[in-house]
Image (cartoon, helix red, strand yellow):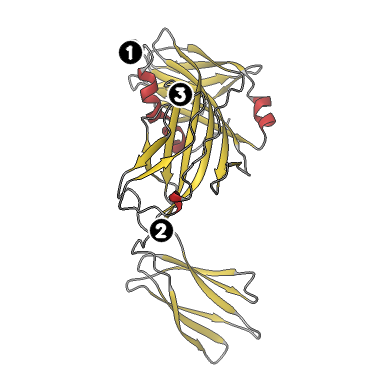
Amino acid sequence: MTSYSLSHRARLMAPLASLLLLLSIPARAGDVFFYIVAKGQIYEQSSTNAPDLALENPYVFEAIVEGTGNGEIYSADLTKPGSSASAIPSTGTYSFYARVVFSSLNGMNSLYRSGTYRFDFDSENDFFTVAYVSLSDDTYPPTPHVVNYAAAQAVNAATNFTVQWDAFSGGTVDDVVELYVYDETDAVVYTDSGLDGTAKSDTIPANTLVAGKTYRGEVIFRKSVDAVVDNSGAVGLSFYNKFTRFRVATTGSSGNNPAPTMSNLLLQQGGQFQFHVQGVAGRSYRIESSADFLTWTPLQTLMAPAGGGIDFTESVGPGLKFYRVALLPP
């Protein structure tokens, strides 16, 4: 197994809280809170039409173990059907997470088959606990489809905006629906963790987003397959997931993203070409050149100092050469 960013594991925890409340969880002093296996498929929606399967590694297997905080979990192993145990990487004193991606469904299913998955835990209070959860029949939910995609391309950040999607066919209160919105750094700027499989929309509150920016949205359908509570009180869950990623853009200007301007172009003696770039202090700019307006070559990336002015100088040879300046994401 391979480890992955902690943010991917953390995304599952909040929405599962409401689902865990539906189960009869006894009071306990155990160290393991829940353990999960899940298979997923990733889609991209770029218009009002149905989403398309993502081009790169669209199939995902995940294994998650989360502790109660009562005692340290020393190790967590997973035994998949027809295989031997392998360690789930630790992401903290009480957490373990593995995420494996595949380019084909057959590739994922050949390594992670339908059947019973076994977890082995070694922890401070629950020594060598064994738990089981099943994942079978490839019962994937429908692919999420954002029905107001066009409206999501011109969002007024100062007002509420409701993202709407086609109904989760067959979805129940035992299933999970999530909406995420990420900024250009992949940080989560909005999510709602209280949606079940009957939800068909979610509202992003006014002023959550910034005017004049582009975001990445994601609607996730999680079909619950198995839910068990073992003798120690730990909860086992399994899901088949569908993810749809889409673009969200706000209207107006952010006030900190003006296009850079170029001025004072000067060809000096000795073949030195110089020009001035006026930008915003603290923002980064990439200077590029081209001989044909088709292929652009990055020359230098600079951060604008106080005042926002940058002077760029380069030695040039014979022939025409064109320049442009790109404002980089903060």
Q: Which residue is outermost to the top? A: 231
Q: Which residue is outermost to the bottom? A: 269
Of the image marks 3 and 2, the number of the one nearer the N terminus: 3
Q: Is residue 22 above or below residue 297?
A: above
Q: Is residue 175 above or below residue 219?
A: above
Name the spot of residue 214 as percent of width and height, x first.
44, 54
Name the spot of residue 96 as percent of width and height, x first.
46, 27
The part of the image, by quadrant, that contains residue 315 is: bottom right
Relative placement, left or right, of 139 versus 75 is right
What residue is pinned by disc 2?
330
Indicate which disc residue 175 carries: 3
Indicate which disc residue 192 carries: none
The residue sitting at 40% across, 55% down in the picture is 250
Q: Secondary structure beneath disc 1? A: loop
Instruction: Please count the marks in the image.
Output: 3
The residue sitting at 57% across, 88% down in the picture is 271
Type of the residue with mark 2? Pro
Label 1 environment density (alpha carbons within 10 Å; few <14, some 14–19, many ≥20):
some
For the N terminus, the image quarter is top right
The residue mark sitting in front, 3 or 2, is 3
Q: Is residue 268 above or below residue 218?
A: below
Q: Nearer the viewer, residue 282 or 193?
A: 193
CA gap between label 2 and label 1 equals 45 Å
Name the spot of residue 186 as percent of width and height, x first.
45, 47
The residue sitting at 66% across, 31% down in the picture is 105
Of the image marks 1 and 3, the number of the one nearer the N terminus: 1
Type of the residue with mark 1? Ala
Type of the residue with mark 3? Asp
Indicate which disc residue 29 carries: 1
Name the spot of residue 107 as percent of width and height, x first.
68, 31
